[in-house]
Image: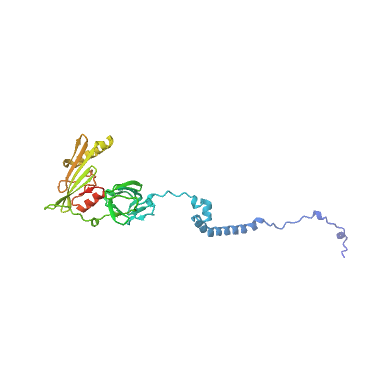
């Protein structure tokens, strides 16, 4: 027992007692380690997922690609050009002469064929670049339904990648709508031409005369090799408009002037006549660069080449 009176009479008011702060718990010190961990986990997820996202972005069939870019059917593709279409029949083998035929041989493309009388109508263009067919020996060989060769038509003119409407004619053709026909493109080499015999005298001189419309060309050969060309071309003013006639007249005036003394243009009341007598054996003669006539062949061209080519252009050669 405590007998101290002083202790017994003393009363302490609890409301006057103040708590003493001995420390403070800060929330930010606890949160920072968790934030660092979250960032690290997120970075790892990005590293792992990035290759898959890139792959999906490049895949037209993926859901992500379609969500961003739309389906492939909604994407406008560049319009294809004739030069990049590879769906062609092999023109080195006979193909039907029909509207559905599209055939290719080397750089030459032919399509949309129709036939009537002695004429083939079609479209042509070059697969790549520009082709001058007059400088090359391409032919369209036409076959009957029994695979008999009917005619070899020379392909002429210049082609590029734009389609060009063409008419090909031959006196050897006479199409009948009751029958089917086929054709192939042939790039002739010297050994491919069929042999031709030119009637000649004791010295080996002979000639082949080819005519077409208003043009008559005599080719003179020695032992079947070309040595001379005699060209006669007549234009009747009644067959042309005034402007067409003047254009032809100007063309042949320029041609005669370029050839010099071996050529002339004679006018008459009904038109004019151009004549040229070209002696290829003359050492002083050189074909002017301004004269582009693909009926004029180089010296020593074989008779079989001249005959086949001119007949293929529609000339009647005898």
Residue at the location (50% across, 57% down)? 55
Residue nearer the viewer, 18 or 307: 307
Corner quadrant of residue 9: bottom right
Residue nearer the viewer, 107 or 305: 305
Q: Residue 233: x, y in percent?
A: 21, 41
Q: Residue 188: x, y in percent?
A: 26, 54
Q: Is residue 278 found left or right of 7 in the rendered image?
A: left
Q: Is residue 127 in view?
A: no
Q: Is residue 76 found left or right of 167 in the rendered image?
A: right
**Identity of the residue furthest to the bottom in this view:** 1
Q: Residue 101: x, y in percent?
A: 37, 52
Residue nearer the viewer, 270 or 285: 270
Q: Is residue 41 found left or right of 23 in the rendered image?
A: left
Q: Is residue 55 in view?
A: yes
**Identity of the residue furthest to the left in this view:** 202
Q: Residue 253: x, y in percent?
A: 21, 38
**Identity of the residue furthest to the front in this view:** 178
**Up-down: is 2 above or below 113?**
below
Please give the count of numbered marks on the rendered protein.
Answer: 0
Image quadrant in which the N terminus is located? bottom right
Residue at the location (24% across, 50% down)? 311
Residue at the location (23% across, 52% down)? 308
Q: How is the image coloured?
A: rainbow
Q: Is residue 290 found left or right of 57 in the rendered image?
A: left
């Amino acid at each position: 027992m405590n007998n101290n009176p002083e202790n017994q009479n003393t009363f302490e008011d609890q409301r006057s007692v103040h708590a003493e702060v001995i420390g403070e718990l800060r929330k930010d010190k606890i949160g920072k380690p968790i934030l660092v961990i979250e960032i690290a986990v997120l970075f790892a997820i990005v590293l792992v997922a990035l290759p898959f996202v890139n792959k999906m972005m490049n895949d037209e069939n993926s859901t992500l690609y379609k969500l961003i870019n739309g389906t492939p059917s909604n994407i406008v593709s560049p319009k294809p050009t004739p030069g990049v279409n590879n769906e062609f029949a092999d023109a080195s083998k006979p193909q039907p002469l029909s509207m559905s035929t599209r055939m290719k041989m080397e750089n030459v493309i032919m399509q949309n064929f129709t036939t009537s009388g002695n004429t083939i109508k079609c479209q042509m263009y070059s697969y790549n670049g520009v082709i001058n067919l007059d400088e090359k020996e391409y032919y369209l060989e036409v076959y009957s339904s029994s695979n008999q060769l009917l005619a070899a038509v020379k392909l002429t003119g210049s082609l590029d990648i734009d389609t060009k409407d063409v008419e090909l004619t031959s006196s050897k053709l006479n199409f009948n709508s009751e029958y089917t026909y086929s054709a192939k493109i042939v790039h002739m080499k010297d050994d491919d031409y069929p042999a031709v015999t030119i009637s000649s005298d004791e010295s080996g001189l002979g000639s082949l005369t080819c005519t077409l419309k208003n043009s008559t060309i005599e080719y003179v050969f020695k032992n079947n090799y070309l040595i001379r060309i005699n060209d006669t071309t007549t234009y009747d003013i009644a067959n042309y408009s005034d402007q067409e006639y003047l254009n032809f007249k100007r063309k042949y005036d320029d041609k005669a002037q370029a050839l010099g003394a071996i050529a002339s243009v004679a006018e008459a009341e009904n038109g004019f006549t151009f004549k040229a007598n070209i002696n290829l054996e003359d050492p002083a003669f050189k074909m002017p660069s301004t004269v582009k006539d693909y009926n004029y062949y180089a010296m020593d061209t074989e008779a079989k080449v001249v005959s086949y080519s001119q007949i293929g252009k529609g000339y009647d050669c005898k």
